[in-house]
Image (cartoon, grey):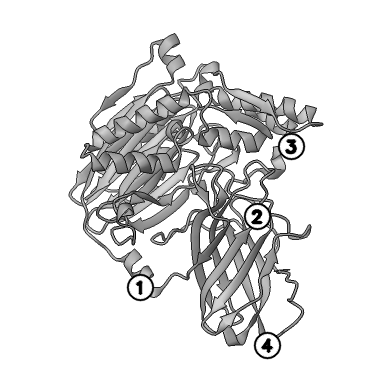
Amino acid sequence: HGATIGVTSAGMALRRVAGRVALLAQTCPRSPFLLEPAQQLLQYQSQQLQPGPTCGPVHQFSAPTAQAQVVGSYGFAATSKSAKHNVSGDALEACTLKVATGNLRGAGTQSRAWVQLVGEGGSTERYTIGDDEESGTFDRASVRAFTIPVPKHIGQLRQIVVEKGRDHERAGEGWYLQHIEVVDPRGEKTIFPCNAWLGESDCGGFTGPYSRQLAPMTAAQVAARDAPMPVSVRASGMSIPHPEKVRKQGAKGHNTRGFGSGGEDAYFYCQPSETTFAMGVADGVYMWRSVGIDSGAMSRALMQHARAAVEGGQMGAREVLGAAVGAIKESGVLGSSTVCLLTVDTGTGLLRAANLGDSGFLVYGRQPNHPAATDRNKYTLKYRTSQLEHSFGCPYQIGHHAQGNKVEDADVAQFHVRVGDIIVMGSDGLLDNVSDLDIAHELTQGVAQGVSVPQLVQRLVRHAFEASMDKHRMTPYSKGATEAFDMVYSGGKPDDITVLVAQVR
């Protein structure tokens, strides 16, 4: 597709060849068959996230139900130059820090980090974590545990200062820290949410500070997060096919009120009752066409059956997904597809979601109490789904084949949305080409100009299409490919593009 590739390191000829083969496999329409040889050559099997529960984002208003994937052993000791000396003479007690790295592309880091606990009566030493061969690095979707001595006199914890090392020579040196959980000797747990990048992000377009001060989640925040609030939802969607499919096959996007498809993408949104709203997106694997299978049939069927399940009274997102997959098996539909679904109980504002693959959704909100008046109307990211991939560009998929994932492999989340929030859902044609920050900018600008929800959808589709055809733009996909294949990759990724926007009122 005219992507620009450049080698950044010497003495890696075999890896370069393998990387180019794999990158071509990623850049071309995805195939469940084409990716395998390149993955074997690169020995990615040892790096793959295994199907199963994964570590999803835990944002301040999020109450995830997915279990965290624990990587590595517990009990590594953090180190400090003065750790051997108890200057205050105060009694020490051992606390465990569980450091959770998010499940986004490039979220992990090979850099060391430093932590310092601050309490009512003082602070700990500045301890180094993740810097020795035994404890290793902070991998994507992992939870690492470290034991540190904490003086009793510091009292109740008020803050954790965390800093990441600066490794500017490494591609993708940012770290997406999800949260740090502190477990004291009595087993009491305190969560210090972060959900942000330290350093330059590998996806999303964010550049964060290398040091952050984390505050514990208070009882008031938990209560506000879980408080029900009646809402209404206004939604729209749009899907367009890959430009090559338009040129060679005469493909067109089919968009009607509540349902649409373009290429192998499909979506739906509906409000079958006064208290129920739902929407979803699915992205079929194009290369099934090479063995005579309609590669868009699976995504369209998933969306049709999911909508039918919601209209039939189902509200749990995983239950809706299970009903859709069961109906597909009964009808004998072939192929495979990523899928993302969510429902909203408009009587309480409770959102339930299930995501399998690299499609997904984001929730944005404004900060009316922000100290800077110019920032009060800006939309900022509140929640983002994880990208569930076996390896870069090889997402989890529901399919008829033996290697397909199961409903139980989906990430699930449950939290309340608020009046003024905007939900943006899309296939990878959106999320690989437009950063989270650029989406926020489009929403802020569009709402300020008074545009409608369908117009917001059209703006995001246009933005994604223009980025996908730009050979020189830095995109979430090009950043991920650069890190995954150890080469400089620039440009967007031409693809089917689907965007849904739901405005909470």
Q: Is residue 490 visible?
A: yes
The image's mark for residue 43 is: 3
State the image coordinates of residue 271 (x, y, percent, origin top left).
22, 43
* Near-viewer residue (81 or 312): 81
Q: Please report whichever mark, 2 or 3, sits nearer to the chain's N-terminal start.
A: 3
Q: CA distance from mark 4 to mark 2?
A: 32 Å
Q: CA distance from mark 4 to mark 1?
A: 34 Å
**Type of the residue with mark 4:** Ser
Q: Is residue 403 visible?
A: no
As drawn, the residue found furthest toward the right would be: 11
State the image coordinates of residue 299 (x, y, percent, origin top left).
41, 30
Report the residue at 23% width, 31% height from top.
Answer: 257
**Residue that badge 2 annotates:** 138
Q: Please report whichever mark, 1 or 3, sits nearer to the chain's N-terminal start.
A: 3
Q: CA distance from mark 4 to mark 3?
A: 50 Å
State the image coordinates of residue 383 (x, y, percent, origin top left).
41, 52
Q: CA distance from mark 1 to mark 2?
A: 31 Å
Secondary structure beneath label 4:
loop
**Type of the residue with mark 2:** Phe
Q: Please report whichever mark, 4 or 1, sits nearer to the chain's N-terminal start.
A: 4
Q: Nearer the viewer, mark 4 or mark 1?
A: 4
Q: Please report whichever mark, 4 or 2, sits nearer to the chain's N-terminal start.
A: 4
Q: Is residue 480 above or below residue 113?
A: above
Are dots 4 and 1 in contact, CB under 8 Å?
no
Tell me the quarter of the image containing the N terminus.
Answer: top right
Q: CA distance from mark 2 to mark 3?
A: 20 Å
Q: Please report whichever mark, 1 or 2, sits nearer to the chain's N-terminal start.
A: 2
Snapshot quadrant of residue 269: top left
The image's mark for residue 220 is: 1
In the picture, measured across the screen, residue 237 lies left or right of residue 113, that is: left
**Residue that badge 4 annotates:** 88
